[in-house]
Image (spheres, grey):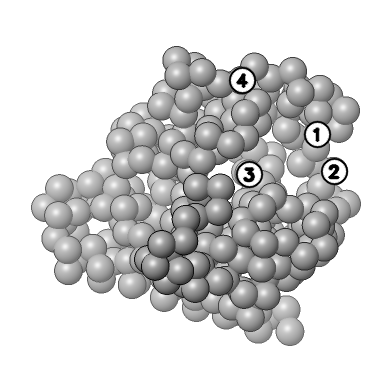
Amino acid sequence: MINFFEQLVNAPAPDRHKYDGWSLDDRDPRVIREVFMPVWKWLYEYYFRVVSDGWEHVPAQGRMLVVGSHNGGLAAPDMFMLMYDWFVRYGTERPAYGLAHPDVWKYFGGMSTLAVRAGAMRAHPKMALAALQKEAVVLVYPGGAEDVFRPHSQRDRIQLAGRKGFIKVALRENAPIVPVVSTGAHDGLIVLSDIYPLLERLHERGMPWLFGIDPNVFPIYLGLPWGIAFGPLPNLPLPTQVHIRICEPIEFDRYGRNAASDRDYVDACYDRVESQMQAELDRLLREKS
């Protein structure tokens, strides 16, 4: 644990030429093994007491797009626990990358450097395509901030926020989609409401955005360390048990550039992924009740 924070403090600030998320070459399996895995192991076994299943659905090799719905604010514990489980099962050498919001490089300094070395790359289609073309695994959470900060009353709903770029990437590269759902992590903070629509209306009437941030969400939540927080602030998740389920791969009838350019087909594929993920989450919740 101490080694992790030493690495974080001493990590060089990213510059425009290195660790900027635009390269597949900065991923470092040694950093994953020595810096992240010991911390994740403790969190996995003792703090979140993770249960996971469905790993038989993961193809033994080759490209794939792992698509999840994540929970619990910026801490997103189910995402990091999935990564730990993945590396335990398949090793750190198997090429695997995760798409990260550009704000990671804008606001998080040395942490973004470590994230890149763990496999983070810019959430841009060209990066996803490049990784898949190298037969890598790509992890994507299309719902973004709307997903992790959705109100607690919607914790059992899949929220992909209507973003369909991942569908186009999968169709173009003939990559299977492996959905991942989870439960428990959204109880690590209690999102009372998202007042972004109200702020958007005020902004249209001339009110500037707070701190110049336009995050598409502006939650009010109860959680650590703030007690009550306003806006998409970082959080420390409560130690709720997390259950992760890997679902059956989804393969479509058509692939290629033409399929990826067919708006109606892309919409149908998106609806299929979202509905199948919701069905799997509903099944997981029934099993736990």
Answer with left or right where residue 274 lies relative to residue 55: left
Answer with left or right where residue 150 lies relative to residue 162: right
User: Where the C terminus falls, by quadrant?
Assistant: bottom right
Q: Could you give the CA–CA distance between mark 4 and mark 2, rounded to whole angstroms?
A: 27 Å
In the displayed structure, 61 sits above or below 143; it is: above
Given the image, on which type of amino acid does mark 1 rest?
Answer: Pro
Q: Secondary structure at mark 2?
A: helix
Q: Secondary structure at mark 4?
A: loop
Q: Which residue is mark 1?
A: 38
In the displayed structure, 162 sits above or below 14; it is: below
Q: Is residue 185 visible?
A: no
Q: Residue at x 31, y 53 (%)?
A: 165
In the displayed structure, 2 sits above or below 90; it is: above
Quick one: label 3 or label 2, which is nearer the N terminus?
Answer: 2
Q: Which residue is mark 3?
A: 83
Q: Which residue is mark 4?
A: 13
Given the image, on which type of amino acid does mark 3 rest?
Answer: Met
Q: Nearer the viewer, mark 4 or mark 1?
A: 4
Q: Residue furthest front?
A: 206
Q: Residue furthest left?
A: 258
Q: How many marks?
A: 4
Q: Could you give the CA–CA distance between mark 1 and mark 3, rounded to whole angstroms?
A: 13 Å
Q: Could you give the CA–CA distance between mark 3 and mark 2, rounded to whole angstroms?
A: 14 Å
Quick one: label 3 or label 4, which is nearer the N terminus?
Answer: 4
Q: Secondary structure at mark 1?
A: helix
